[in-house]
Image (cartoon, rainbow, N blue to C red):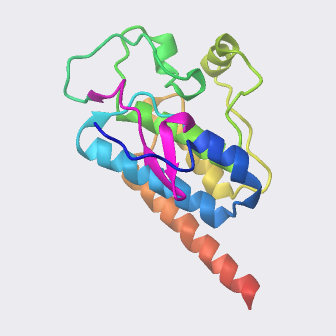
C-alpha cells in the first residue's frame, strides 16, 4: 500500500500546533472526515483495531485514516483479545475479556475517544502511564468534557465510548448527529453575523 505524504503530520501533532485557531466548524469537519474514512472501512468489512490520533494523517487540512497494521477483515478468523495499540483508545472489553473479538463497535469506541481529543486539543489521560490508563478505563473512568463543547457533541462521544459495545451507536446514527451539529453551528454563525 502506498500513501501520499501528509504535509500536516498526524492529528495529534496538528491539534498541538493548530488547536487555538480551530473553530467548532473546523472540529466538526474534522470529525466528519474521520467518520467518512471509518464508514469506508466498515462498508468493506474492515475493522481498523488501532484507531487513534497518531494514525490519522492530515494533508492540506484534510484528515485521512492510516496505519492498517492491525486491521482485519470482519469475517476473518477471530484472534485473541490480547490488545495492541494505544491504551486510551482501546475498547475496554479487550481489557476484561480474553476471548473478546474486536468488532466495528471497537472502532466506534476509539472514534469516541478521538472526538473528545478533537474537543480538547490533547491526548486522553496524557499525564498517566499506560498501566494507569488501563485501570482507569477498566473502572469506567473517561476524560471529562471540555468547557465550551456543544452538549450534543459530548452526548455523542460519550455514547461512542460506552463500556457496553451494544450501547454504542451505529455509524449511521453518528453521521446524523454530526450533520445535526453542523447545521446548528451554521445557524449559530448566521445569527451572530446579522
Measuring from the top left, give residue 41's x and y in whole percent: 31, 43
**Residue positioned 43% across, 35% down in the render:** 107
**Residue at far bottom of view:** 194
User: Does 156 sit left or right of 23 as displayed?
Assistant: left
| Residue 123 percent across, percent down from the top left | 67, 34
Residue 158 visible from this viewpoint: no
Residue 190 drawn above or below residue 30 = below
Residue 167 is situated, as x and y percent measured from the top left of the image, at 46, 37
Asked whether 56 falls inside the magenta stretch, the response is: yes
Magenta span:
53-72
Q: Quadrant of the N terminus?
A: top left
The residue shown at (45%, 28%) is 50
Residue under the point 43% across and 57% down: 175
Relative to 37, say whether 160 is above or below.
Answer: above
Place of residue 95 in the rendered image (x, y in percent of width and height, measured from the top left): 51, 13
Left or right of 192? Residue 14 is left
Q: Is residue 10 visible?
A: yes
Image-quadrant location for residue 42:
top left
Direction right: furthest residue? 147
Foreground of the two, 140 or 85: 85
User: Vertical placement of 16 versus 99: above or below?
Assistant: below
Amino acid at each position: 500500500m502506498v500513501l501520499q505524504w501528509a504535509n500536516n503530520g498526524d492529528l495529534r501533532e496538528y491539534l498541538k500546533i493548530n488547536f487555538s485557531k480551530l473553530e467548532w466548524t473546523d472540529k466538526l469537519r474534522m470529525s466528519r472526515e474521520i467518520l467518512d474514512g471509518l464508514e469506508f472501512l466498515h462498508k468493506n468489512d474492515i475493522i481498523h483495531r488501532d484507531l487513534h490520533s497518531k494514525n490519522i494523517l492530515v494533508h492540506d487540512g484534510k484528515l485521512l485514516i492510516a496505519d492498517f497494521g492491525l486491521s482485519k477483515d470482519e469475517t476473518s478468523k477471530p484472534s485473541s483479545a490480547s490488545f495492541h495499540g494505544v491504551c486510551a483508545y482501546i475498547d475496554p472489553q479487550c481489557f476484561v475479556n480474553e476471548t473478546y473479538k474486536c468488532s466495528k463497535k471497537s472502532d466506534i469506541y476509539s472514534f469516541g475517544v478521538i472526538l473528545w481529543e478533537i474537543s480538547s486539543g490533547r491526548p486522553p489521560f496524557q499525564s498517566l502511564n499506560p498501566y494507569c490508563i488501563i485501570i482507569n478505563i477498566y473502572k469506567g473512568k473517561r476524560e471529562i468534557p471540555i468547557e465550551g463543547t456543544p452538549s450534543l457533541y459530548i452526548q455523542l462521544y460519550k455514547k461512542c465510548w460506552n463500556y457496553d459495545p451494544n450501547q454504542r451507536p451505529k455509524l449511521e446514527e453518528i453521521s446524523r448527529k454530526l450533520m445535526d451539529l453542523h447545521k446548528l453551528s451554521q445557524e449559530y454563525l448566521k445569527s451572530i453575523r446579522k
